Amino acid sequence: MLFAGLAVAIIATPFELSIAKEARPPKWSRDVLDTFFEDARDRLDGPRPDYSNRDQNRPAMDTPAARDEQVTFAWSNVIGHETLESEVKRLSADAASRIATASAFKGGGYKDARRDFSELAVLFAVISQYDGDPRWKDAAAGLRETFSRAAASSKVGSDASFREAVACREVLADLVRGGRPTVTKSDAAVADWSQIAARQALMQRINIAHEERLTKWLADDGTFKRNQSEVVHEAQIVAMLAEVIHREAFEFSDDDTYVGHAKDLERAASDISNAGAAGKFEQAREAIDRATNACANCHDGYRG
């Protein structure tokens, strides 16, 4: 056994030595060497970045100043806290009927649910940042995340998306009854609004407000007066969504023409709301025409 052990050691030693040898350096031809600089530092401009300073190299959107700017935006100039609360209640009532059965949900109801959940995610994002103390503000950031996930899930009608939709329906019902569902705690700041809701779903809600409601309610003075409070409500929803869809990270948010159309729509919607509150039909009528033009101009150049 001793001799066998020595034999193994003798055989292993040359093998171990052979794998310890370093590979020979490669030899490059002149045409390859000419592709690279002798010293790249001679060709670079400006000082080297200081990687020890994390704040200096952090993306601008993640800086404390950027987060403070988002949270302190005066949403009260765009939408009233009563409108935020009443819209959540309306969407809760809609959810009770739209998410009643799995067959109805899978048969197409998931599309309406996706639009509603997208709007709810934005509503709670706004509530979490609101310059005041609207209802549900303490839990709004977590609710924003809850409905954002549900909206993403509802892109398809499946058993899984239906279960999540049902859970969200119950969360809404509990909120409206005065309860406080357990949700994940989240920061009120939003670094990327496009991750909260799809722009297409928000545009669908704007279209419903404009085509199916405001345009009809502003057809004549009598219809306007019968729906005056509804005009104010829908106009504020449009103004809020128009503000959101041109925020940074959304598609076309770096396009001045697109942003201009969105701001035109927001101003027109705010004017409709103010005219509705004051009972001034002619001013509301003029503003809905501007809103229509803003939508038409945008649709001519942008889709999706």
Image: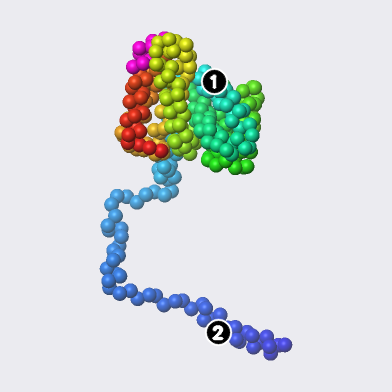
Q: Which residue is drawn at 58% across and 83% down?
A: 13
Viewer-closest of 165 and 136:
165
* In the rendered image, the vertical position of residue 28 relative to residue 171, given as above or below: below
Quadrant location, the C terminus: top left
Is residue 150 something that shows in the picture? no
Viewer-closest of 29 and 194:
194
Q: Position of residue 122 (x, y in %)?
A: 50, 30
Q: In which quarter of the image is residue 41?
A: bottom left
Q: Name the residue under label 1.
A: 86
Q: Which amino acid does label 1 sit on?
A: Ser
Assign a secondary structure to mark 1: helix
Instruction: Specify whether 219 is left or right of 145.
Output: left
Q: Quadrant of residue 29?
A: bottom left
Q: Position of residue 227 (x, y in %)?
A: 47, 14
Q: What stretch is highlighted in magenta?
A: 278-286
Q: Residue at x 54, y 20 (%)?
A: 86
Discs 2/1, front? 1
Viewer-closest of 298 and 267:
298
Q: Where is residue 28 in the image (x, y as percent from the top left)?
A: 33, 74
Q: Which residue is drawn at 52% across and 78% down?
A: 19
Instruction: Specify whether 281 is left or right of 90.
Output: left
What residue occupies the far bottom of the structure in this picture?
3
Q: Earlier in the sequence, mark 2 or mark 1?
A: 2
Instruction: Specify whether 243 is left or right of 128.
Output: left
* In the rendered image, the vertical position of residue 6 relative to residue 38, given as above or below: below
What residue occupies the far right of the structure in this picture?
1
Q: Quadrant of residue 249?
A: top left
Q: Mark 2 points at which residue?
A: 14
Q: What residue type is labelled 2?
A: Pro
Structural crowding at the residue carrying mark 1, measured as other residues with C-alpha within 10 Å and reported as few (<14), some (14–19) or many (≥20): few
